[in-house]
Amino acid sequence: MNEIETRIEDDCPDEVREQIVRSLVAYNDANASPQDYRDLVVVSRLGGEVVGGLIGFTHWNWLFIKQLWVSESVRGRGVGTELMRAAEREAVARACLHAHLDTFGFQALPFYQGLGYSVFGQLGDYPVGHTRYFLQKRDLKAGEV
């Protein structure tokens, strides 16, 4: 009898990773509407130099913001807000209704709350001594984007 072997694969081939993702997406698509997954990248430049950026994606009518970074040299000048607003405008153009993201207590929680995001969950001691917050913004069209 063949036994199932389960192991950690530190050098997992890309084909195996892609198979896992393709298989999960196929299952999801069979049980919900198609994901309509699209990457989203917004970049701010000053004199050609990258001073801020947002990386995320849209799917199932949601915007997910994976990373947002603003150079210390331009913080406080509205760059983060403009990156977020640009991403939200594009998400609305892609028929997204809502947005979500996560941040740490030592990062930008008040910033996101000021943009209309609210906490719907948190993990304490992630990393130890800190909190990871999960935020959402319902009804992107109702907000100022």
Image (cartoon, rainbow, N blue to C red):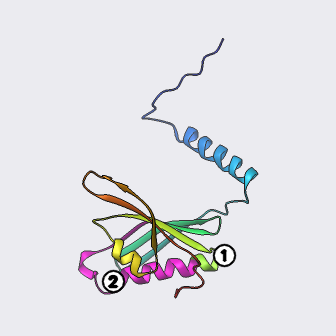
121 to the left or right of 32: left
How far from the left and from the top, in percent, is residue 100? Answer: 51, 67
Name of the residue lying farthest toward the top: 1
Residue visible at 50% across and 81% down in the picture: 86
How far from the left and from the top, in percent, is residue 77? Answer: 31, 87
Which quadrant is the N terminus positioned in?
top right
Out of 28 and 43, give the one closest to the viewer. 28
Describe the element under mark 1 as helix, strand or loop: loop
The segment highlighted magenta reads: 66-90
Corner quadrant of residue 63: bottom right
Residue visible at 68% across and 51% down in the picture: 28
Q: Write down the residue under mark 2.
A: 46
112 to the left or right of 31: left
Out of 16 and 30, give the one closest to the viewer. 30
Q: Write down the residue under mark 1.
A: 95
Q: What's under tag 1, amino acid-wise?
A: Ala
